[in-house]
Image (cartoon, rainbow, N blue to C red):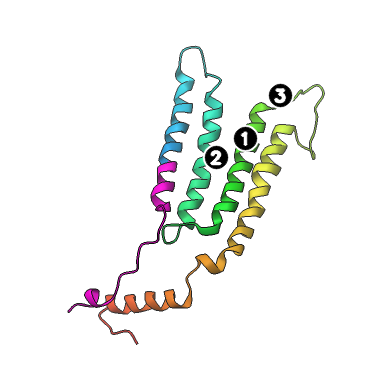
Amino acid sequence: MSDEAQSPQPAKPAGPDMHRWALGLIVASAIAIGLAYASAFLPGGTPGWAPWLFMIGTSVIMVATMAVGAARGGSIGRLWIPFSMVLVIVMGGFGLVLALPPADPGDPELWLGLPPRAAVIMYGIGFLPFFLVPVAYAWTFDDLTLGEGDLERVRDEALRARGEMPK
């Protein structure tokens, strides 16, 4: 009997396959971004919905890419909480940038030394997720990284692939 028949295959975890779901979101977001770009070629200029569609597509594609990278065993586990927070922060920040009035060069208003739209991009969309994501990975490190048993199984499979017997 072969080794494959003797060793039980790990059961597929219950729940949705996060890779497939996140890749679907990436494709849908890319289509949304493409539609937003293509709308600039419509007669009469860019429609008012195009920047909002671009904002949604860009925000979702960033978080879906993080989910693809973090998925293990068909799930992202507790990372759905910080990933959802990042999505809200990024989407809210881009939405605020679109909703804010343009800066007045004659009487500039500054938020922490920057025009309001630039401040939202730098401090809200840039820095908040920059601090949130590493904390989230540290919070879930033990759950989502390879344990000693996983490493041993990988080593055994590598030895089998080379034709050697595992210890």
Please report the residue visible at 74 percent of the width from the left and 25 percent of the height from the top. 103
- In this view, 122 is above or below 39: below
Please report the residue visible at 63 percent of the width from the left and 32 percent of the height from the top. 95
What residue sits right under mark 3 in the picture? Answer: 101
For the residues labelled 1 and 2, the Cα–Cα distance comes to: 8 Å
Image location (x, y in percent) of residue 12: 36, 62
In the image, is 130 to the left or to the right of 143?
Answer: right
Q: Are marks 1 and 2 in contact (CB under 8 Å)?
A: yes
Q: Amino acid at mark 1?
A: Phe
Q: Residue furthest bottom?
A: 167
Please report the residue visible at 56 percent of the width from the left and 33 percent of the height from the top. 55
Mark 2, secondary structure of its residue: helix
Q: Which mark is residue 59?
A: 2
For the residues labelled 2 and 3, the Cα–Cα distance comes to: 21 Å
> 11 and 31: which one is in front?
11
Mark 3, secondary structure of its residue: loop
- In this view, 57 is above or below 142: above
Please report the residue visible at 24 percent of the width from the left and 78 percent of the height from the top. 6
**Quadrant in the rendering for residue 27:** top left
In the image, is 41 to the left or to the right of 85?
Answer: left
Q: Amino acid at mark 2?
A: Ser
Q: Amino acid at mark 3?
A: Pro
